[in-house]
Each structure stands twice: as structure tokens, then as C-alpha cells.
Amino acid sequence: MRALILVAALAACSPQPAATTETPATTTTAEAPNPTQTALAEMPTWETARAAGVDFRAVGQEPGWIVDIYTADRIVALIDYGQTRIEFPRGAPSAPAEGATRFEAQTQGHTFNHQPPFPL
């Protein structure tokens, strides 16, 4: 079972090597499409997410990740710069302390647990 916790240290991804194309007269090096860059370009902007019903967004890096909590029905986690997408059903949040909201969800062997720090 894998756990996704917002306060997590994640390993960095290494860049992909460039592809080389040779012709009889010249040698050309063309940058192969980098899956990480492609995934990053496809990650939703805040404006797009907000328009789709996202109420809360958490963002981290190395490797890049985004967690969107929708107001109605789901929690979406994009990890490894968007290469991995996990969609959780959103249940009712709990309030373990004043000013704090806790979300817990499970799907297909993945667990989501988010509780922001308690207010000062």
C-alpha cells in the first residue's frame, strides 16, 4: 500500500537523454520529447482548476506534485511532475482542532491523508 502525505520528501527525477539523427552529409542532435516537460505542460493552471471546482490546492517540488481538493466530489493528486495521477473520492472532512480541516481517502491501494498545521 502506498501512502501520499503532503509533508513528504520525494526523490528527484533525472533528465532524459537527447536523441541523435545521422545523415550522410551532417549529424544533427534533436532534443527528444522529455516526458517530464510534457507532463508539466499538461498540469492544470490555478485558473483552470478553480474554474473546474477546485477549492484547495497544495503544491510541492522535487519531484513536482500538485494536490487539488474539489468542493464537490474528489481529490486529485498529480505526482512525479504530473506523470502519475491518482483520483480519490472525497468524503466529508473532519475538524480535529479549531481552524484545521482533515481529509482522508483511499483508492486502489493508495492512501491520502492531509491535515494542515494547527493555527498558532
Image (cartoon, grey):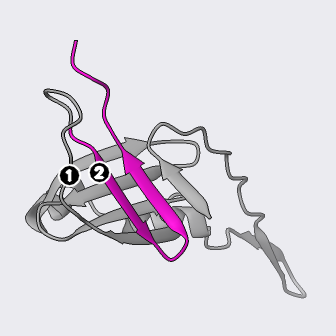
Residue 26 place in picture, x, y as percent: 84, 77
Residue at image location 29% in from the left, 51% down from the top: 103
Secondary structure beneath label 1: loop
Residue 90 shown in magenta: no
Q: Is residue 38 visible?
A: no
Vertical order, 101 against 28 (above or below):
above
Residue ID at (42%, 67%): 106
- For disc 2, the marked residue is 103
The x and y percentages for residue 100 are 20, 32
Residue 7 is marked as none
Q: How many marks?
A: 2
Q: Is residue 107 magenta?
A: yes
Q: Residue furthest right?
A: 24
Q: Position of residue 54 (x, y in %)?
A: 16, 59
Which amino acid is tagged 2?
Phe
The answer to whether mark 1 and mark 2 are in CB contact below 8 A is yes
Position of 10 compared to 50: left or right?
Answer: right
Q: Nearer the viewer, residue 16 or 66?
A: 66
What residue type is disc 1 on? Answer: Pro
Q: Which residue is more in the foreground, 3 or 53?
A: 3
Q: Classify the position of the N terminus by image quarter.
A: bottom right
Residue 100 seen anywhere in this rendered image of the structure = yes
- Mark 2 neighbour density, 10 Å: few (under 14) some (14–19) many (20 or more): some
Range of the magenta residues? 101-120
What residue would you read off at disc 1? Answer: 93
Q: Give the CA distance from mark 1 to mark 2.
A: 5 Å
In the displayed structure, does residue 110 sit left or right of residue 49? right
Query: Looking at the rendering, in which quadrant would you find the C terminus?
Result: top left
In primary-sequence order, the first of circles 1 and 2 is 1
Q: Nearer the viewer, residue 33 or 95?
A: 95
Q: Quadrant of residue 24?
A: bottom right
Q: Residue at x 73, y 63 (%)?
A: 16
